[in-house]
Amino acid sequence: MKFALIGKTLEHSYSKFIHENLLVKNYQLIEVDSIEEVLNMGLSGYNITHPFKSDIIDYLDDYDHIVKETKSVNTVIKKNNRLCGYNTDYYGFESLINYHHIDLKNKKVIIIGNGSTSRTIEYYLNKNNAKSIIKLVRNIKADNEDYIKNQNQYMDTDIVINTTPVGMYPNNKDKSLVNFRHFPNCQYAIDLVYNPHRTNFLIDAERHGIKTINGLYMLLMQAKKSEEIWFDMTIKKDIIHEVYKKIIHQYVNIVLIGLPLSGKSYYGKMLSEDIGKEWIDTDLKIEDYAKISIAQIFKLSGEKKFREIEQYVIESIYDKQGIVISCGGGVILNHKNTNLLKQNGIMVYINKSINIINHDNFTSRPLIDSMEDLIKLKEKRMETYSNVADIEYMIDEEHPFSLEKFKESIHEYFSY
């Protein structure tokens, strides 16, 4: 039996990893220019993604009631020489909403985009008593749509859902289609994109104190439903949660930030060796690029030049996945750096008590000559560290560093 994902561009996809950790042992990613190409490939079943979710309908012998309502198919099975289509995106989105305990009743919702996936989301929202649904789009096709430039007219919105591929790998630097300052009452920002871990859409929402959710759980649950259709069996949710953990380990970076001399390099290297991830130290990368020490860069060219090189280094590594990154103390001074690092990584603030920092190393630090300098630096930066961080890990006399507790704090973050 042969199974695959069909789409035009699939380099972003986690589907092969997911299905091969479920029941399918050789799941393929097949890029095509038209849906007709897949009809004679001898596949037992397949998933369909952008831009063919509607195109396949003309070639189906039968389809479920959700496809009839949404005109969108993402799962096909060949049975008794007949092609049957299903919309398991609906089940995936329903599972995501339930997993996060989101009450849609009487909520005012904005959907970004009007493609096939947006129709699925709209259908689910209507079935679950959303008060109003407005689609913000580039090209208006229906009465409940408005141009995205008019987003500031919907300030009472409760939930914003992105159904477009904007910001999806490899186009990580795509700007968010909305600015969340227009939505002061917004409670949830949901992006159906799952790669990168956080798009600029979600990063902007976080900055405004809004709870953010990416599309990974929806992807996992629609994959579960697809395989249940293909193999006519039930897959336990416990298995899905195990695959979720594997994906996080495989694709999400751990980014260490904090004061100079707080041990980011030491702890990052220790963690990477323990969990089998590549380790990158941005200061070492800077020195490798400049061919001189950081102290010499400051002495010869000043801090401005150093920060330029630092940003260049961040831009060269931010889209890597599944690595540990130890950052220089001042990386958080440039919001562009933190935005990039947040996309594929969780930010862990190593908040180490100044009392236990090794004072003998001051001579190697261009901005620190004494304990007083370090105290002033902490007072100046600590709020920024805390605001940027997803996890704050404290180290002091009563709480020495523990690798096991450090890993536990990361696991807890992903356990909701």
Image: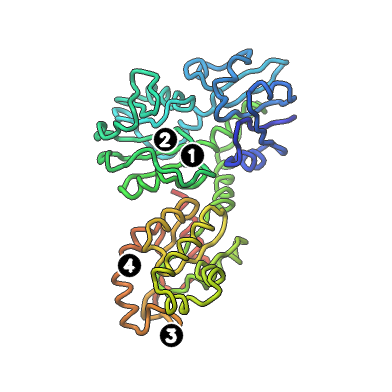
Q: Position of residue 63 (x, y in %)?
A: 58, 16
Which residue bears the numbered disc 3? 363
Looking at marks 1 and 2 on the same chain, the residue that comes earlier in the sequence is marked by 2
Residue at numbered disc 4 = 382
Q: Earlier in the sequence, mark 3 or mark 2?
A: 2
The front one of 14 and 78 is 14
Can you identify the residue that label 1 sits on?
193
Q: Amino acid at mark 4?
A: Met
Q: CA distance from mark 4 to mark 2?
A: 33 Å
Instruction: Please indicate whether residue 357 sits to the left or right of residue 245 in the image.
Output: left
Q: Look at 42% across and 42% down and name the residue there.
A: 213
Identity of the amino acid at label 2?
Asn
The residue type indicated by label 1 comes to Val
The answer to whether the residue labelled 1 contacts the one labelled 2, judged by CB atoms less than 8 Å apart, is yes
Q: Position of residue 10 (x, y in %)?
A: 60, 37
Residue 412 coordinates in the image, percent (x, y): 46, 55
Label 2 sits on a secondary structure element that is strand
Assign a secondary structure to mark 3: helix
The disc label shown at residue 162, or none? 2
